[in-house]
Image (tube, rainbow, N blue to C red):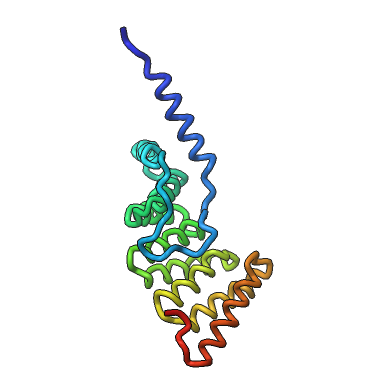
C-alpha cells in the first residue's frame, strides 16, 4: 500500500510557518556574551535550519529565510555560517540594522572585533536610533579594542540620540563610574 506524504508535508509547512511567525529581527536585547559563552541550543534548531535550507534551495534570495537561518546559526554559536547568511541578506537589504548588528556580534565572537566595529558603525549610519548597535559598539570598543574613551563616546551618543533608552540611568551610571576610574589612572576593566 502506498503512503501519502501529505501529513509529513503539512507538518513541515506548519513548523516552518511557526518559525516565520516567530521571527523578530534583532532579538538580542542584552550585551553580547564573551567569546565562547552562549545560549542553550534550541532542540528544534536542526529541523528549523533544514527547513530554511529547503526554502533557500528553491529561492536563494529569500530574505526572510536568509535572516531566519542566520539567526538560528547565531543562536547555536555557528558564527561563520551566520555571517555567511547575514551577508547574503545584507546584499538584498543593506539597511537592516538588526541583521548587521547580529552579524557584528558573530564577528566579535569569532575573534574579529575590528570587523564587528565596522559593521556596527554601518548599522548606526543607516539607523542612528538603533540602540543595540550603539550599546554593542561601546562594549566592543571597551572590552575588545581597549578603547575606553571611544566606548564611552559611543554610549554618550546612544543617550543623546535615543532619549527614551530604557536602560538610560544604568548606562549613565556606568559612564560616570568609568570616567572617574579613568581619571584616577586605575584600570577601568581588568
Q: Quadrant of the C terminus?
A: bottom left
Q: Is residue 132 left or right of residue 48?
A: right
The spot of residue 112 in percent (x, y) is 34, 68
Residue 44 picture quarter: top left
Measuring 41% from the left and 47% from the top, which residue is drawn there?
72
151 or 118, nearer to the observer: 151
- View extreme (bottom): residue: 184
Measuring 54% from the left and 64% from the top, which residue is drawn there?
132
Q: Quadrant of the N terminus?
A: top left
Question: Against 175, is 61 above or below?
Answer: above
Question: Against 67, is 109 above or below?
Answer: below
37 or 99, nearer to the observer: 37
Measuring 64% from the left and 75% from the top, which residue is drawn there?
160
The spot of residue 140 in percent (x, y) is 44, 72
Question: Against 149, is 121 above or below?
Answer: above
179 or 91, nearer to the observer: 179
Amino acid at each position: 500500500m502506498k503512503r501519502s506524504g501529505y501529513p509529513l508535508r503539512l507538518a513541515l509547512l506548519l513548523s516552518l510557518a511557526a518559525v516565520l511567525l516567530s521571527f523578530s529581527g534583532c532579538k538580542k536585547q542584552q550585551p553580547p556574551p564573551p567569546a565562547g559563552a552562549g545560549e542553550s541550543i534550541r532542540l528544534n534548531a536542526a529541523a528549523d535550519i533544514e527547513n530554511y535550507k529547503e526554502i533557500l534551495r528553491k529561492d536563494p534570495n529569500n530574505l526572510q529565510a536568509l535572516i531566519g537561518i542566520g539567526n538560528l546559526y547565531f543562536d547555536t554559536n555557528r558564527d561563520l555560517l551566520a555571517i555567511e547568511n547575514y551577508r547574503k541578506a545584507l546584499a538584498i537589504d543593506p539597511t537592516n540594522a538588526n541583521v548587521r548588528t547580529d552579524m557584528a556580534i558573530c564577528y566579535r565572537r569569532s575573534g574579529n572585533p575590528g570587523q564587528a566595529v565596522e559593521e556596527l558603525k554601518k548599522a548606526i549610519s543607516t539607523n542612528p536610533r538603533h540602540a543595540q548597535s550603539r550599546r554593542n559598539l561601546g562594549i566592543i570598543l571597551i572590552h575588545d579594542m581597549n578603547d575606553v574613551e571611544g566606548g564611552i563616546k559611543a554610549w554618550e551618543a546612544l543617550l543623546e540620540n535615543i532619549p527614551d533608552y530604557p536602560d538610560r540611568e544604568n548606562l549613565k551610571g556606568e559612564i560616570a563610574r568609568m570616567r572617574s576610574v579613568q581619571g584616577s589612572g586605575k584600570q577601568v576593566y581588568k
